[in-house]
Image (cartoon, helix red, strand yellow):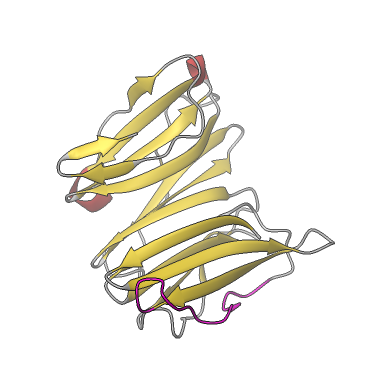
Amino acid sequence: AVNPDIAVAGNDVHVLWEEIDDDGYVTYAYVRSRNGGDTWTRKLLPFPDNGCYGSGHNAIAASGRTVHVVWGDCGLAYTTSSDAGRTWNAPRFLTRSDSAFSPDLVADRRFVNVVWNDSVGSWEVFHRRSADRGTTWSKRIRLSGTAGIQSWTPVIALEGTSVVVAWYDEKNTSVRQKTGAAHGQSWGTAAIVTRDGGMYPSIAGSNGWAHV
């Protein structure tokens, strides 16, 4: 088991991880707790495997009883559950690019924001948002800056009605951050968080502050 992720909504706890077989194929396993982690369901495999090696990692988010999952499988697949993880909708693809990897997502009521890495000659950070719990999605936009400068490992957090994204940027080995107002509808310019040595950022938002 590798690359676990966790989401909490009230007393509901959702855990997602990858399992890799001897041939290198990836499946995605899931468990949930309805009582704050005291007891757990048996391991489930609700997410289809299209026979790919996986395009790298997975992410899970929850808001109320709605749970959102994104994972790499011949592209970037997405699905949602409206009953706290008991049943799942048929997956759809946010991108069919088989180089898409390292997704992250956040959910706040009806708003869902997803970021990920993809190669377009250089590795860049991309974003899509939904304003209706994942039913429809905006077009893909690129958040990272200068084309040709590699950008890696995006992470995303909620801060009020904004979403904040951070990633590693090859230029000056820096960590950069960008804020999307109105639940990710409009984006400011990227700010440099640190230079010379920043890699693999993590991020959290709380009480008007973003912590990177």
Image point (25%, 33%), residue name: 188
User: Residue 212: x and y, percent?
Assistant: 35, 34
User: Residue 43: x and y, percent?
Assistant: 59, 77
Q: Is residue 139 above or below residue 29?
A: above
Splitting the image into 4 quarters, where does residue 29 fall? bottom right
Span colored in magenta: 34-49
Image point (46%, 81%), residue name: 89
**Main secondary structure along the magenta-highlighted residues:** loop
Q: Is residue 57 above or below residue 91?
A: above
Q: Is there any visible trace of residue 73 in the rendered image?
A: no
Q: Is residue 4 above or below residue 136?
A: above
User: Residue 117: x and y, percent?
Assistant: 53, 43
Q: Is residue 90 magenta?
A: no
- Along the horizontal axis of the image, is 10 left or right of 36? left
User: Residue 88: x and y, percent?
Assistant: 47, 81
Q: Is residue 38 magenta?
A: yes
Viewer-nearest residue: 61 or 75: 61
Q: Is there any visible trace of residue 159 in the rendered image?
A: yes
